[in-house]
């Protein structure tokens, strides 16, 4: 049987790569999307390399985005994010990707989905995963999204033109509540570890935070060392599953084990000198917080942007374990410099108390993006059982 081909664009957004489809080129029956995305990315792959697809063997480059006309009056486009598992035949739509969000506005302009005059663009993005609005501001170059610029972001070798992402009212993106349990700090009982204090926060993406010292860590451990520590990875998995139930994301530990993306789990520590993947050393005086994050069973080299935003929001909530580790600043609106294995990520978070409740107004950060390839993505027809339905778009 012949291969099936679909129009697609391959893009980098921040520190992630993804296949980007127009919604018009996919079946109207979204139940058919999974098998297409798995085949296009090259999953499941027991070897973990995705050589028979467009994936790269790690979660940050095993992604798909779908863009189409907006279904909301307060947005210009709809954007759906799909996280494709590497070794499993699983596609997760429960979370957003902040990095790829930076490429959605430029994609919409370059593909003619919206028309903008002048040298500056503002695209209002409705992320269907979280039901949240993201504003993307970026420069235009002869009517297309600008690519060349001098912004450097940790984890990407080349500089590029800045995209400012503003996540409006990011609280409750996954659960509907900024503090899903109603508490700034909770105590959970972790098998093999005992009782520990955690903060469960849901801003842009739900995340459970624990202090590195409560895990017997410094907080500056590198991804390879974290992944090689089987006992630590098992403990972090336990924390994630317990938090999933406590936050109301899933009804049971068994159900939580089947939802790989959210909540994210991470550990934080106060500022300290720390090594980078490049071999350089971050100086403590140049950062406000140290963080490490795990999702889909893998430690991140560069923190996911949505989780970085959640971390910054948590850092502004007095009494949270993240706030306890963050450098004290008299300016509550000052951006927070977060140290991660790839470098320093600076995130702004507007957080306050309203009517006795913590409230996140918005979070913002800068990314770069670039179109890498466009044309058609080919998938083996026998990998798509509903090939005939897909070929006729339902």
Image (tube, helix red, strand yellow):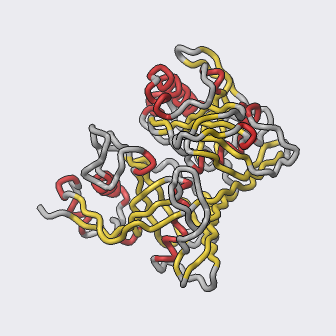
Viewer can see residue 184: no
Residue under the image location 32 percent in, 53 percent down: 41
Residue under the image location 21 percent in, 54 percent down: 385
Q: Quadrant of residue 124?
A: bottom right
The quarter of the rendered structure image containing the C terminus is: bottom left
Depicted 97 relative to depicted 274: above or below? below
Depicted 16 relative to depicted 307: above or below? below
Q: Is residue 303 left or right of residue 257?
A: right
Place of residue 380 in the rendered image (x, y in percent of width and height, measured from the top left): 20, 57
Depicted 217 relative to depicted 21: above or below? above
Place of residue 115 in the rendered image (x, y in percent of width and height, measured from the top left): 55, 82
Residue under the image location 59 percent in, 50 percent down: 305
Farthest residue in the right direction? 330
Place of residue 199 in the rendered image (x, y in percent of width and height, measured from the top left): 68, 32
The quarter of the rendered structure image containing the N terminus is: bottom left
Total of numbered circles in the picture? 0
Farthest residue in the left direction? 1
Foreground pick, 195 / 364: 364
Farthest residue in the front direction? 280
Q: Quadrant of residue 162?
A: bottom right
Place of residue 358 in the rendered image (x, y in percent of width and height, measured from the top left): 78, 43
Viewer can see residue 39: yes
Q: Is residue 37 left or right of residue 81?
A: left
Foreground pick, 305 / 344: 344
Residue under the image location 48 percent in, 26 percent down: 233
């Amino acid at each position: 049987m012949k291969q099936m081909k679909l129009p697609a664009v391959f893009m980098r957004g921040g520190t992630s790569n993804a296949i980007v489809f127009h919604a018009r080129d996919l079946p109207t029956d979204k139940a058919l999307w999974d098998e297409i995305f798995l085949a296009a990315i090259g999953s499941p792959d027991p070897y973990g390399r995705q050589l028979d697809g467009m994936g790269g063997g790690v979660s940050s480059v095993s992604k798909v985005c779908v863009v189409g006309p907006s279904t909301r009056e307060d947005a210009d486009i709809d954007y759906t994010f799909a996280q494709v598992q590497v070794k499993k035949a699983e596609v997760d739509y429960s979370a957003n990707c902040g990095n790829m969000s930076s490429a959605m506005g430029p994609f919409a302009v370059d593909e003619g989905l919206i028309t903008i005059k002048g040298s500056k663009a503002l695209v209002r993005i409705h992320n269907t995963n979280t039901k949240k609005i993201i504003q993307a501001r970026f420069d235009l170059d002869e009517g297309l999204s600008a690519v060349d610029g001098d912004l450097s972001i940790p984890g990407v070798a080349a500089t590029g033109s800045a995209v400012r992402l503003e996540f409006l009212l990011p609280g409750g993106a996954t659960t509907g509540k900024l503090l899903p349990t109603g508490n700034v700090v909770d105590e959970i009982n972790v098998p093999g570890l005992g009782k520990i204090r955690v903060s469960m926060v849901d801003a842009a993406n739900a995340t459970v935070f624990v202090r590195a010292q409560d895990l017997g860590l410094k907080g500056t451990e590198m991804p390879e060392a974290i992944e090689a520590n089987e006992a630590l990875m098992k403990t972090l998995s336990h924390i994630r599953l317990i938090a999933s139930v406590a936050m109301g994301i899933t009804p049971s530990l068994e159900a939580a084990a089947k939802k790989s993306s959210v909540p994210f789990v991470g550990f934080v520590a106060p500022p300290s000198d720390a090594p980078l993947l490049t071999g350089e050393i971050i100086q403590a005086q140049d950062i406000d917080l140290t963080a490490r994050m795990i999702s889909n069973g893998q430690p991140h080299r560069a923190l996911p942007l949505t989780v970085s935003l959640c971390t910054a929001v948590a850092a502004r909530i007095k009494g949270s374990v993240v706030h306890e580790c963050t450098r004290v600043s008299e300016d509550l609106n000052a951006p927070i410099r977060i140290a991660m294995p790839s470098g320093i990520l600076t995130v702004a978070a507007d957080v306050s108390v309203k009517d006795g409740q913590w409230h996140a107004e918005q979070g913002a950060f800068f990314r770069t993006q670039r179109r890498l390839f466009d044309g058609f993505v080919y998938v083996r027809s026998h990998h798509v059982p509903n090939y005939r339905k897909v070929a006729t778009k339902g």
